């Protein structure tokens, strides 16, 4: 398990807000008394407790812990992950999986030095080296509870997307009564593929949208082509066949009906409060899908251009030069520097994301339904949309 | 056939037309006025006021109409049915005359025994000299002459063979009947005598069992023996599969052998009284053939319209706008030489006027065919007219003997066959098939490329010439190891000099190795270079110095499918062959369909239902794999587009000639070409140097590359500025290159190739670019204003227009059905914003996106004159145009009920 400090930031609240992230799959926010945070051991046990980890955390010492705290000034970001074994991680119970993918994870300590962190011995503090996000659930706060919006990150991965779709009949409830309409469904998951390993998609899930675009009236071939065209960063909105794992929009504590919804059986730490959603899920419901669509423009600019001096045919690997990978890695840093100060409190952060959405909207309206964009613009967007 | 008639988009209707539609429906028409008639429940086709249509798809029942007679009075319609009844109906009101002739009224002669049923009404004929007499022919063979006034049978003609057709000779003295055993009989009707005499029964191709004679016609001539024409009757075993019409005149007998099924025929007669047979008009399934019966040897008259486009299957097409007059005339001259075998006679069918204005410019549509021919069509106006046909087969040693022209009948061959018609679906060698065509209208250079990797360079020559065609083999693999080509072998180029007729004459052949189908082709006549690409790579050939300038292998070494050759293609040929055999069988079945007994029908229906269910079961579990494209996909190296451009590739101050190539795997290669100055062009070496390479992240196939000049306008065609026909490109501002993949449009700056703009298509609406072209849209208001636009067709069948250079969506129009895959694949755009696509193998549909350049069929068919009736006492019709109105008259459904009722009463 790795705990790592992130770019710090000023914060003033009686409790320290801590976001902790386990295995890229389990996300916890909790508060910590500012003046009673105790020592490392205490914090360690707390984390163990919250994440139900009993024997996985390697023993670390106070010295290491304090060093982490001191180097991470106001914000300490904790990411908990396994050192090895990627695919196994995501096969855990789906309730926990629902918590991941919020992109930004952070521990925001109060004031001066009251920060806790952990790291595994022998591991550097810094961005994880053998760590890559492959999927996430997004927009939980704006979607009906029976829907799920899943992002599959294909870039740089040798793993196939690994699923098949088919035509089918979907039953919709309309004011006129129950209506049968043609729909597109997942027909098969390939063993070991990206889709299967996320556990977020299942056979017979109905696909409603691809990258924010409604599929009503589209043929199976069209949907196939759309998905392939978006395969580098595919966002599908599905209506899961199994509705039992839905996230209920429970008004838990100060969630404000947003992604407090993520709160479910998983968290034990009753003293810890579920907190404001991450900026990712704060985007305005109306513009959310569009904003997403645009923020993904980035991945297409990864065309490889070879000049004559380096022309050696058939020997290039787009990954090495692709903007997407670097951008995605960089964006949290940039983003936090510039934007996070506004996102400390709810109203502000909402405003920020709204303003982003506004720029994207206007930009989007420039073209017709087909979005025309210049690469420079999309570069800027990449910087702005912090958590995507 | 109806579809066939709209070939080339324009039909000059004939006044006299009698034919039987595909699938057995009847289309009877004459100069007489007969109201359109539609059977209940069936979809009819009331096309114009002198046509009678009976639908073929009527459910089998006793009321099914099996024959129609339009009475010369213009007021009666006789309908013979499956049940053997003849209904006499007043037209155009469709009032039942209450004079139904029931088959049991006939009381056949006593010796016509052992026949329970007369069967359906096969034929109805009116006595040409006495319109009160009508001959009714029943399927069993019995013919009855019926008097309409007295409502009684006058005579019975007891033929014993299954009846196929009947013909009442001009003078009313004889009835000819043709039968299913290949025989015909002539029955003389002697007045006053009650007994008919079978004058002769004749099986023209006799001895061995023969097929039925489907239709027989006899026409007198002014001073000589009559013409006898009949279709069918061939010896079953040896020539049962031929589609023949035999014409017998005096001692001459010819069996015209058609390549597709005969639907119907009639004879045009001219002379002062319209009595002399002058031309035989035959409608066969795939074309219309007119034979001159007055000229010695009965030659074919060239069709001015309805020329079958698909005489051999169309494999590609290429459109060239605004042909210079000089080239136009030379092509026409070359074409005229080819048409010597046709009759000099004028086209005998008149009627209708073409009101369309003269086309503003001369346009050519070139179609490449499976048999290695390229046909040049005048596409300036509404009607496609053939100008010239180029055959590339002569360059190669083909397996088939080229001198086997039209199987000229040997002396004394019986039956005396003569092949007519140009529809010939059988290709001698599929490798000859034409895949890409490029014509330079300024220089007269033409390049065509085919299925076996052959690229021919041709030059227009007004004289016949005997020359050796130089062959050059280009190895596109560039020494790649582990390659095993399993496709077809390359074509054998003739080494000896070949005599080429005037027209386009080949002087060089480039043969790609491996001989895979050529997938991209471009010609730059100013630089004298031709670029070609296959699934393995691409090359540039200098046709002046006759050597290769550049060869580039694009093959991914792990791409087994591309390596091994077109196995799937072989499979598809097999499949299509199988399908065509099935089709033939089906058409035979449909031919005989009303002789099938009811039990058979039930079985057939059940089988059909079962088959449909099976087909559905097979189709049901359709699923699509969702996977990102990768460099390991098959055919990523297939070259989709090649383009020459004079632009800035190395630095922003010097423009150089360049070659651009786009592949299936989303890669674009750009090469700088060094072309020596004109004075050293013939001896100094040309070089090509790799300059840039773009790998599109999304890896979708690159289908188009357009270089835009400093004004954002597409670069002109080669030689276009030299001929002062285009503004020279702006070389001061910065150039851009627009790369069009199946999924998106992307503009890169030159020479840096940084991405400037893009437009996503597939990611947004799920459609993909299939065809793309640059078009110039002239304003319809002012002569001097116009804009360039990018026109493209998607796999959903929508045509879109994008602005240039800003690639903004301008308009979208659903043009082709999305299911019509071959239609979408066949689409070509013109430079003026029009387009062509194949709506069927034989028909091009033309569309226009431009308001200035619009080609529309504007024509007029004058309604026939009010008829003059022989029997004046009957009231005249109001006029021809009223006929259609009666379609909607309240009498119409009433009439149908009447028929129904009378039959129900009959059955109970």
Image (cartoon, coloured by chain):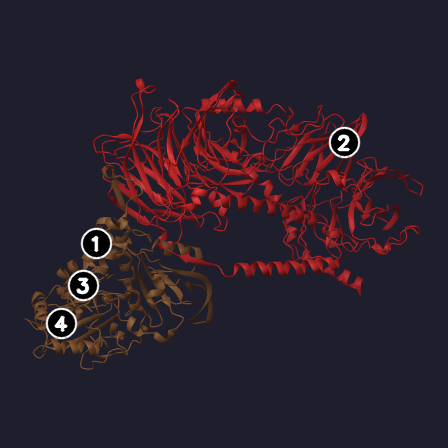
Of B302 and B863, which appears nearest the observer? B302
Marked residue nearer the N-terminal end (1 or 3): 1
Asked if one can make out residue B873 in the rendered structure from this viewpoint, the answer is no
Residue appearing at x 31%, y 76% in the figure: A248
Q: Which residue is mark 1?
A: A326
Q: Which chain has been coloured brown in this picture?
A: A
Label 1 marks a residue whose chain is A
Q: Which chain has been coloured red in this picture?
A: B
Q: Please, which residue is most extreme toward the bottom here?
A: A270
**Which numbered mark, 1 or 3, is in the foreground of this view?**
1
Q: Which residue is mark 4?
A: A60
Label 2 marks a residue whose chain is B
Marked residue nearer the N-terminal end (3 or 4): 4
**Which numbered mark, 1 or 4, is in the foreground of this view?**
4
Q: Secondary structure at mark 3?
A: helix
| Labels 1 and 2 positioned on one and the same chain | no
**Which numbered mark, 3 or 2, is in the foreground of this view?**
2
Q: Which residue is mark 3?
A: A352
Residue B414 numbered mark, or none = 2
| Cα separation between marks 3 and 2 | 93 Å
Asked if the residues shown at circle 2 and circle 4 are in contact, with their CB atoms under 8 angstroms apart, the answer is: no
Q: Secondary structure at mark 4?
A: loop
Asked if the residues shown at circle 3 and circle 4 are in contact, with their CB atoms under 8 angstroms apart, the answer is: no
| Cα separation between marks 3 and 4 | 39 Å
Q: Position of residue B515 (x, y in %)?
A: 46, 35
């Amino acid at each position: 398990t790795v705990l790592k400090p992130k770019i710090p930031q000023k914060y003033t609240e009686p409790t320290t807000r801590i976001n902790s992230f386990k295995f890229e799959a389990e996300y916890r926010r909790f508060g910590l008394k500012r003046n009673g945070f105790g020592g490392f051991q205490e914090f360690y046990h707390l984390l163990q407790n919250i994440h139900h980890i009993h024997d996985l955390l390697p023993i670390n010492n106070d010295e290491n812990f304090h060093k982490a705290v001191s180097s991470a000034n106001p914000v300490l970001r904790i990411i908990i992950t396994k050192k090895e074994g990627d695919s196994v991680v995501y096969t855990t119970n789906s309730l926990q999986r629902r918590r991941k993918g919020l992109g930004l994870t952070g521990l925001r300590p109060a004031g001066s030095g009251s920060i806790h962190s952990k790291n595994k011995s022998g591991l550097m503090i810094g961005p994880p080296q053998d760590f890559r996000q492959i999927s996430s659930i997004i927009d939980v706060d704006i979607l009906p509870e029976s829907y799920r919006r899943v992002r599959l990150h294909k870039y740089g991965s040798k793993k196939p997307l690994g699923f098949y779709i088919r035509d089918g009949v979907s039953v919709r409830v309309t004011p006129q009564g129950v209506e049968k309409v043609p729909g597109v469904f997942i027909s098969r998951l390939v063993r070991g593929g990206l889709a299967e390993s996320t556990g977020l998609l299942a056979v017979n899930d109905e696909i409603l949208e691809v990258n924010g675009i409604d599929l009503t009236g589209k043929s199976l071939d069209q949907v196939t082509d759309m998905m392939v065209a978006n395969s580098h960063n595919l966002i599908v909105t599905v209506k899961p066949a199994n509705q039992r794992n839905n996230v209920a929009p429970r008004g838990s504590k100060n969630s404000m009906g947003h992604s407090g919804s993520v709160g479910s059986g998983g968290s034990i730490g009753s003293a810890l409060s579920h907190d404001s959603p991450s900026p990712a899920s704060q985007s305005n419901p109306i513009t959310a899908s569009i904003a997403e669509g645009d923020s993904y423009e980035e991945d297409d600019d990864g065309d490889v251009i070879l000049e004559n001096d380096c022309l050696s045919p058939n020997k290039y690997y787009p990954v090495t030069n692709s903007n997407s990978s670097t951008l995605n890695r960089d964006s949290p840093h940039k983003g936090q520097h510039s934007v996070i100060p506004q996102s400390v409190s709810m109203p502000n952060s909402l405003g920020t994301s709204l303003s982003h959405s506004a720029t994207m909207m206007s930009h989007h309206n420039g073209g017709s339904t087909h979005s025309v964009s210049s690469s420079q613009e999309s570069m800027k967007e990449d910087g702005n949309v912090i958590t995507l | 056939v109806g579809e066939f008639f709209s070939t080339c988009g324009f039909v000059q209707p004939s006044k006299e037309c009698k034919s039987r539609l595909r699938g057995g429906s009847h289309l009877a028409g004459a100069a007489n006025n007969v109201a359109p008639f539609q059977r209940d429940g069936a979809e009819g086709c009331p096309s114009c006021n002198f046509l009678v249509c009976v639908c073929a798809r009527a459910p089998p029942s006793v009321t099914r109409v099996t024959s129609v007679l339009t009475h010369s009075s213009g007021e009666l319609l006789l309908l013979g049915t499956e049940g053997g009844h003849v209904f006499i109906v007043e037209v155009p009101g469709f009032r039942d005359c209450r004079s139904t002739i029931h088959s049991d009224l006939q009381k056949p002669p006593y010796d016509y025994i052992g026949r329970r049923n007369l069967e359906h009404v096969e034929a109805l004929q009116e006595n040409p000299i006495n319109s009160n007499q009508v001959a009714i022919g029943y399927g069993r063979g019995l013919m009855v002459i019926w008097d309409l006034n007295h409502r009684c049978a006058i005579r019975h003609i007891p033929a014993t063979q299954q009846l196929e057709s009947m013909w009442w000779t001009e003078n009313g003295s004889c009835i000819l009947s043709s039968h299913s055993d290949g025989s015909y009989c002539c029955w003389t009707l002697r007045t006053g005598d009650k007994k008919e005499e079978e004058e002769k029964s004749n099986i023209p191709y006799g001895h061995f069992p023969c097929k039925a004679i489907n239709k027989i016609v006899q026409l007198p001539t002014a001073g000589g023996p009559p013409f006898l024409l009949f279709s069918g009757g061939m010896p079953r075993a040896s020539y049962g599969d031929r589609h023949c019409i035999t014409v017998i005149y005096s001692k001459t007998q010819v069996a015209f052998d058609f390549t597709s099924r005969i639907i119907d025929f009639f004879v045009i007669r001219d002379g002062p009284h319209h009595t002399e047979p002058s031309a035989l008009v035959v409608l066969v399934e795939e074309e219309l053939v007119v034979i001159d019966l007055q000229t010695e040897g009965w030659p074919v008259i060239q069709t001015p319209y309805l020329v079958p486009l698909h005489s051999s299957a169309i494999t590609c097409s290429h459109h060239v706008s605004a042909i210079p007059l000089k080239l136009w005339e030379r092509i026409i001259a070359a074409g005229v030489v080819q048409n010597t075998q046709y009759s000099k006679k004028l086209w005998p069918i008149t009627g209708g006027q073409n009101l369309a204005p003269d086309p503003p410019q001369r346009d050519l549509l070139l179609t490449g065919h499976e048999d290695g021919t390229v046909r040049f069509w005048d596409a300036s106006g509404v009607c496609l007219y053939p100008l010239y046909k180029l055959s590339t087969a002569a360059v190669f040693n083909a397996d088939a003997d080229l001198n086997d022209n039209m199987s000229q009948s040997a002396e004394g061959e019986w039956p005396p066959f003569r092949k007519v018609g140009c529809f010939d679906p059988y290709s001698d060698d599929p490798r000859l098939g034409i895949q890409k065509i490029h014509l330079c209208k300024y220089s007269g250079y033409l390049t065509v490329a085919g299925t076996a990797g052959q690229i021919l360079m041709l030059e227009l020559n007004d004289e016949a010439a005997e020359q050796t065609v130089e062959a050059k083999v280009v190895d596109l693999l560039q020494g790649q190891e582990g390659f095993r080509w399993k496709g077809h072998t390359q074509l054998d180029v003739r080494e000896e000099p070949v005599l080429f007729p005037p027209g386009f004459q080949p002087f060089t052949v480039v043969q790609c190795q491996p001989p895979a189908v050529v997938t991209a082709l471009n010609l730059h006549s100013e630089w004298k270079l031709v670029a070609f690409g296959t699934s393995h790579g691409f090359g540039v050939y200098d046709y002046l110095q006759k050597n290769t300038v550049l060869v580039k292998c694009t093959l991914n070494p792990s791409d087994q499918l591309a390596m091994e050759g077109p196995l799937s293609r072989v499979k598809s040929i097999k499949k299509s062959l199988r399908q065509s055999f099935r089709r033939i069988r089906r058409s035979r079945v449909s031919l005989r369909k009303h002789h099938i007994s009811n039990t058979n029908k039930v079985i057939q229906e059940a089988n059909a239902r079962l088959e449909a269910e099976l087909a559905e079961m097979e189709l049901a579990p359709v699923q699509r794999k969702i996977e990102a494209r990768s460099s390991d996909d098959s055919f990523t190296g297939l070259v989709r587009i090649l383009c020459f451009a004079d632009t800035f590739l190395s630095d922003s101050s010097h423009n150089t000639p360049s070659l651009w190539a786009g592949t299936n795997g989303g890669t674009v290669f750009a090469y700088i070409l060094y072309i020596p100055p004109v004075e050293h062009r013939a001896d100094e070496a040309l070089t090509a140097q790799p300059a840039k390479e773009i790998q599109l992240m999304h890896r979708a196939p690159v289908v188009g590359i357009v270089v835009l000049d400093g004004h954002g306008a597409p670069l002109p065609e080669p030689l276009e500025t030299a001929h002062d026909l285009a503004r020279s490109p702006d070389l001061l501002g910065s150039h851009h290159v627009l790369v069009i993949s199946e999924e998106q449009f992307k503009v890169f700056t030159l020479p840096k190739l940084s991405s400037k703009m893009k437009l996503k298509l597939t990611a947004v609406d799920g459609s993909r670019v299939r065809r793309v072209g640059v078009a110039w849209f002239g304003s319809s208001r002012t002569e001097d204003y116009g804009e360039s636009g990018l026109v493209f067709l998607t796999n959903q069948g929508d045509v879109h227009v994008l602005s240039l250079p800003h690639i903004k969506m301008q308009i979208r129009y659903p043009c082709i059905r999305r299911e019509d895959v071959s239609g979408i694949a066949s689409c070509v755009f013109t430079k003026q914003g029009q387009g062509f696509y194949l709506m069927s193998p034989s028909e091009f549909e033309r569309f226009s996106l431009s308001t200035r350049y619009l080609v529309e069929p504007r024509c007029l068919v004058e309604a026939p004159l009010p008829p003059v009736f022989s029997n004046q006492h009957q009231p005249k019709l109001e006029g021809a145009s009223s006929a259609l109105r009666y379609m909607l008259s309240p009498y119409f459904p009433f009439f149908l009920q009447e028929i129904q009722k009378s039959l129900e009463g009959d059955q109970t």
